[in-house]
Amino acid sequence: MSKIRVVIADDHIYAAEGLEKIVSEAEDMVCVGSTTELLEIPALVKNKSPDVLVLDIAWLGDKLAGIEILPDIRAIRPNIP
């Protein structure tokens, strides 16, 4: 059985690292990419083809940045959870 491919996007480095650790310890998941830079998310999703995106909604300086970038992500991977 193939593992669930996960991309993590969070502006807090410690949160991103913690989520990466949780995913890496799971037997059925693998972290294929992580970023703390909002504008890197669409390219990461495109290049890594994750099954799941763990996305922080509120980014430093913009409480809705995660929601606002969703159309860009959906244009690349329309059905990504």
Image (cartoon, grey):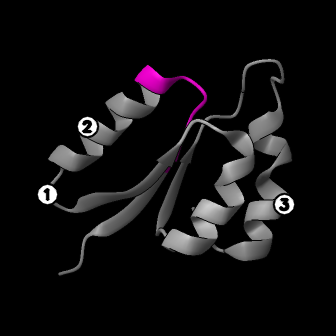
Residue at figure coordinates x 17%, y 81% from the top left? 1
Residue situated in front as seen by the camera: 79 or 12: 12
Residue topped by disc 3: 71
Instruction: Please identify the quarter of the rendering in which residue 18 is found.
Output: top left
Residue topped by disc 1: 27
Q: Element under label 2? A: helix
Residue topped by disc 2: 21
Q: Position of residue 37 (x, y in %)?
A: 65, 39
Which amino acid lies under the numbered mark 2 shown in the image of this protein? Lys
Give the mark toward the camera: 3 or 2: 2
Which amino acid lies under the numbered mark 1 shown in the image of this protein? Glu
For the C terminus, the quadrant is: bottom right
Assess whether mark 1 and mark 3 are in contact (beta carbons under 8 angstroms): no
What is the number of the mark on residue 57? none
Label 1: few (<14), some (14–19) or many (≥20) C-alpha neighbours in 10 Å: few
Residue at figure coordinates x 67%, y 74% from the top left? 77
Residue at figure coordinates x 70%, y 61% from the top left? 42
Q: Position of residue 74 (x, y in %)?
A: 75, 67
Label 3: few (<14), some (14–19) or many (≥20) C-alpha neighbours in 10 Å: few
Q: Is residue 29 above or below residue 25?
A: below
- Magenta region: 8-14
Q: Element under label 1? A: loop
Residue at figure coordinates x 67%, y 51% from the top left? 40
Which amino acid lies under the numbered mark 3 shown in the image of this protein? Pro
Give whichever of discs 2 and 1 has the lower sequence position.
2
Q: Element under label 3? A: helix
